[in-house]
Image (spheres, grey):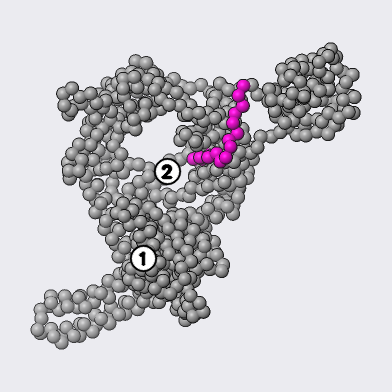
Amino acid sequence: MSKYLAGSTEVARRAVRSKLRAVDYLRVSTEEQVKGYGIAYTGKRTKNHIANKGWEHVGTYADEGFSGSLEAHERPDLSRLMQDARNLPRPFDVVCVPEERAIGRAGRAFWPWVWELEDLGVFVAIVKGDYDNTTSEGRSRMRKAADRAEDERETIRERTQGGIQEKAEEGGYVGGKVPFGYRVINKGIKGESRLVIDDCADCFPGCVVKHEADFLRAGRRYFVELRDWDEVANRCNGDGYRKRNGGPWDYFSARQQLLSEIVLEARQVFRGSRYVQRDSDGNPVYGQSVIIELDPIFSAGEIDELKKANKKPPRKASTSRTYSLSGQILSPCGKRYVGAGKGRREKSYRCQGRTSYVGGPTCDCAYLRAEPIEEEAWNKVKALLGDLEQLKKMADDWIGVRAGSRINFAERIADLDKQIATQRKAVNVAISMTSKQVAAEYEEMSEEEAEECVAQAVAPLQQELVKLQKDRSDIACWQKESDAGGERIAQLINLVEMANRRLVNMPLEKQRELMVLLETEVTIVGDAPQGRRGQPCALAAWFAERDLAVPMLSDEGWAEIAPLIDWKSRKLAPRTVLAGILYKVRTDTPWKDLPSLFGSPATLQTYWTRWRRSGFWGQAMDALVDERSTPLPAPPAPQIRLRCLIEPEVLLESESRSSESAAPGSPAGHRPRPPPPRPGRSPTPRCWTN
């Protein structure tokens, strides 16, 4: 008895014992949402279908605004459904969807999902057409429906992409974001929309609009004269120029627009982005890249002046602090945190939103203490890169297959081979029988008519054979991708070995390079460790530098110290002053917040400074070395969420280059750089760790 028949029998047995438990999976794309077909609309159909079948509805999974071309692990609720289906005992028996497209238009999104559910003993029911895959007839209908959905998707894509490609080759506007400094004319008129310079050339007399190209020309003139981007932003804001969103210009936005490649080279590259989908040879899948020439905003001489003004002298080696997470900590105001530099005595991060410019708002995001956040982020990176099981789990999530629930591709290929062989026999028999029939009637028809008659009789069988062969080819490709998981595991093992070997005592400069390579993003969860204002606590630093704990002052300890003190004050007892100073360092309380029972904070601070300079403080702490003590208070570890892009091959290549640069004969000061994206590389997982 075949596996599929056994599965059908098991479903029948469960149906006899009790009601089948059903969940519905609902998906609508963004386009469907616009038309008013939301989750609530599709959910009514699935619930009615489940009720009509006499099944028990036990849950709903819904992905709103997700494309049908995405695979199961790329849709949040569908991924959750699969995780629940893998649990024992199984929480449901059937997954009900409104139509095939809810599962996916692409075959690689459709079949692996259905197959894994089948292997788990969970079946799929389609409301549109009223069929499911508990029978061979239902599976056949499902396969044909999936083929139609994918053919429809490919037809739409070919027509759309072909039209866009043709428009780009003609120099027309192909949609998307309009480059700054340009505008679209004849928009909506088929074949006539294109980009032109956004200035007053085509405006009515007396136009007072502040055009984008006018800002670029004014900004270029100011920068050539002043060589200061802040001043360029200030002057342009004063002239009334604003960004597209209505906000004022600042250092970064003015520099970005004036030095953009589109403005300087007067051209736009269609399908030139690194995000364009490419084949294994690195070529764009849906058409070649096209350079669209634009009207230049600047003359060649003006561009040379701008580039010369922006050219900076070689930078000297930096002696500033190293901030391993500069630009990688997300701020509540939407900006990012960067190193605060030497302006603050304590190493801190400053939000970019605090930067002020004329007419622009500033945020009040607090300064962050650098060391606790850097230490916590680095600990998470070390733990992640050094944990083979965690990396394997993320790799399994990435390819959409988990250990212990892998799809048996070989079994399905073997099953398709049998169907293909049977179908070929059917084609041959049909050809033979039709040929005999035509031969008997040959005298009444021409040779061309006879051939056409045979072809028509065999066509349906031949089409079914072609579809079976296509299915087998697709499954073989998916099997090859799945088998590549062995190579991925080997890379992960090498990565873990590298991490355990290299990350233990890595200096901050190297940590910074690795954080950039991982494209790390840090989000503060809860209260952030805010930077201390003013001078760091010298008292705590005294204990930290000597790696000493803070002693408790007992009667025996005071008896050792009292003879060493030359005390003349009548207002305070020396023991009270010493106890107050130790309390301050033990609790990390600011001087101004010390309890009044210890006396004036200014007096305590004065005596601590005097005792340190006279040498008494060191003698006193030596005398108390055997007393009971407490460690210096450590700041609480910040709660952070860390996201990073893990590409084992890239990290291993960087490690190899780093080792080569450290070898004798390597150029001094050489720093490994992350390689550019390689054409055809499979997408890599964005990994979160909390």
> Residue 103's x, y, as percent?
39, 62
Residue that mark 1 sits on: 45
Q: 317 or 389: which is nearer to us?
A: 389
The number of numbered discs placed on residues in the rendered structure image is 2
Mark 1 vs 2: CB contact within 8 A: no
Q: Nearer the viewer, residue 280 or 122?
A: 122
Q: Is residue 461 visible?
A: yes
In the rendered image, which quarter is residue 372 located in? top right
Q: Is residue 51 magenta?
A: no
SS at mark 2 in the image: loop
Residue drawn at point x = 37 percent, y = 16 percent = 226
The residue at which mark 2 appears reads as 677
Left or right of residue 403: residue 301: left
Q: Residues within 10 Å of mark 1 (few under 14, many from 20)?
A: some
Q: Mark 2: few, some, or many residues within 10 Å (few <14, many ≥20)?
A: few
Q: Which segment is the magenta one?
A: 519-534
